Image (cartoon, rainbow, N blue to C red):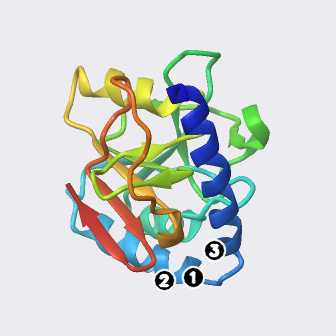
């Protein structure tokens, strides 16, 4: 079996596990862990998070709390196929417009270069690897950002999304931390 097929099979199983976890009501616990992690980071850091779609674990509570604490928050914007993401400043009251893949994006964009990128995922392992959706957007973005600055790559997921080992390729970027409702894993 080739790596693409293996990733697709893992992705399907992970999405099923995530759908089950999504109805379990642990989002508040996961956000508490995320808030705790972010409070420990440099106060000047620019934080990129995401606006959830489908059954993704929602970081909206943590994002709103960070903005209320005076932190700068941005969200990813898909610029095109096989391109790194752009990160646009976000606030709870920002006017939004339709983005790619059913997301919303800030209508009036201020492009930022985040220090911390919180990413959704399909699956993760204890080695710090994430399985995304197959577009490579985050992997390209982590690679591009890390060329000019230290960027923390942080996965945000339900603990049920953990797998023994994520199928990986040389282009797959290792995360610095993974945050679930059960705690914070750092690598």
Q: Are marks 1 and 3 in contact (CB under 8 Å)?
A: yes
When the figure is inspected, residue 30 is found, relative to residue 141, above or below; the finding is below
Q: Are marks 1 and 2 in contact (CB under 8 Å)?
A: yes
Splitting the image into 4 quarters, where does residue 76 fall?
top right
Q: In this rendered view, identify the residue nearer to me: 96 or 143.
A: 143
Q: Is residue 36 left or right of residue 96?
A: left
- Residue at 43% from the left image edge and 23% from the top image edge: 140
| Position in image of residue 181 (x %, y %) | 45, 77
When the figure is inspected, residue 102 is found, relative to residue 38, above or below; the finding is above
Task: Label 3: state its secondary structure.
Answer: helix
Q: In 3D space, how far apart are the residues under numbered discs 1 and 2 (Cα atoms)?
A: 5 Å
Q: Which residue is mark 2?
A: 29
Task: Label 2: state its secondary structure.
Answer: helix
Splitting the image into 4 quarters, where does residue 41 fall?
bottom left
Task: Label 1: state its secondary structure.
Answer: loop
Q: Which residue is mark 3?
A: 21
């Amino acid at each position: 079996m080739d790596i693409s097929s293996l990733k697709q099979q893992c992705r399907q199983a992970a999405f099923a596990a995530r759908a089950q976890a999504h109805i379990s009501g642990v989002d508040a616990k996961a956000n508490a862990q995320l808030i705790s992690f972010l409070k420990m980071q440099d106060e000047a850091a620019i934080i990129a998070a995401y606006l959830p779609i489908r059954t993704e674990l929602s970081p909206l509570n943590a994002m709103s709390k960070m903005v209320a604490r005076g932190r700068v928050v941005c969200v990813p914007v898909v610029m095109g196929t096989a391109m790194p993401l752009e990160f646009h400043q976000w606030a709870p009251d920002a006017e939004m417009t339709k983005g790619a893949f059913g997301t919303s994006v800030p209508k009036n964009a201020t492009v930022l270069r985040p220090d911390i990128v919180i990413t959704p995922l399909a699956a993760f392992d204890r080695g710090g690897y994430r399985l995304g959706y197959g577009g490579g957007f985050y992997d390209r973005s982590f690679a591009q950002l890390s060329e000019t600055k230290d960027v923390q790559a942080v996965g945000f997921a339900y603990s049920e999304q953990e797998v023994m080992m994520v199928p990986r390729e040389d282009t797959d970027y290792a995360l610095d931390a993974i945050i679930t409702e059960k705690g914070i894993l750092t690598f």
